[in-house]
Amino acid sequence: MQHHHEKLFIEGPVGKLQAIYQTGEADKAAVVICHPHPQFGGTMRNKVVYWMARAFENLGHPILRFNFRGVEQSEGNWDEGLGEADDAATALDWMHEKHPEVPLWLAGFSFGCYAGLTAAHQDSRVKRMFAVAPAVNLWDFSFMRNETRPLKVIHGTIDELVPHEMVSAWVELLDSVEYHEIDGAGHFFPEHMEHLQLALTSTL
């Protein structure tokens, strides 16, 4: 499969956002992927984000990864998650303009789940959501409680940053969730990248 990656900039709410776009097939849902916490070294080149992108790419989906404001070449500064959710909303807008005929999907890793799901929750064009190791211990995800669209949550049982039992408890409160626990996986899935990719793309 051809992996043609286009490096580009998107006009964001506070300046340009650096992005990598993969064209994909015309009839496949367009996926926006949000990276982990910028203040702890999170970028769109994060290994987990990269492998998430590859999993969707291998199925032919168009994909957009982008850097939140203030990360690498993206303009602006860290904004406590609020501005980052706006950045995610901008990325969804951009993807929709590029692929108006297909549904949007939103996938996030760790902090990226918070910013991404915040944007997706308010955007009816998003038909499916994916949360990998959602940082429910650091951010308030209660806005997802009345969400009825499909959400897939993937979490490692020995996550050293986000306690496994907190994610399990959060998932219990949700309506339309599909929960995948990956036994023995840590936050960055170092030994479990294939399990993560399988969990992401199974049942699609």
Image (cartoon, grey):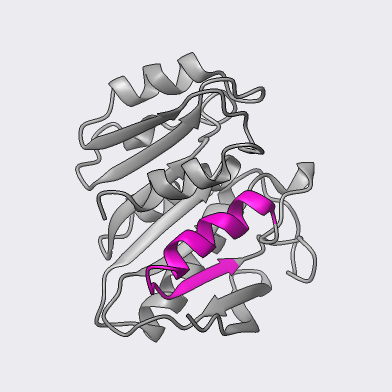
Please state the horizontal and vertical placement of residue 184, each as a whole percent of the image.
Answer: 56, 23
The reply, left or right, for residue 152 in relation to residue 70 is left
Q: Which region of the structure is painted magenta?
A: 46-65
Number of marks in the rendered image: 0
The answer to whether 193 appears left or right of 179 in the picture is right
Residue drawn at x 36%, y 53% as measured from the top left: 201
23 versus 180 height, above or below: below
Q: Which of 149 and 119 is in front in this view?
A: 149
Judge whether residue 123 is colored magenta: no
36 or 54, nearer to the observer: 54
Q: Position of residue 36 (x, y in %)?
A: 64, 46
- Magenta span contains residue 62: yes
Instruction: Please name the residue shown 74% across and 64% down the image.
Output: 76
Q: In this view, does 14 lie to the left or right of 87?
A: right
Q: Quadrant of residue 61?
A: bottom left
Q: In this view, does 186 lie above or below 147?
A: above
Q: Pick whichever, 37 or 190, lies toward us.
A: 190
**Which quadrant: the C terminus?**
bottom left
Q: Name above or below for residue 173 compared with residue 30.
A: above
118 up-or-down from 204: above or below = above
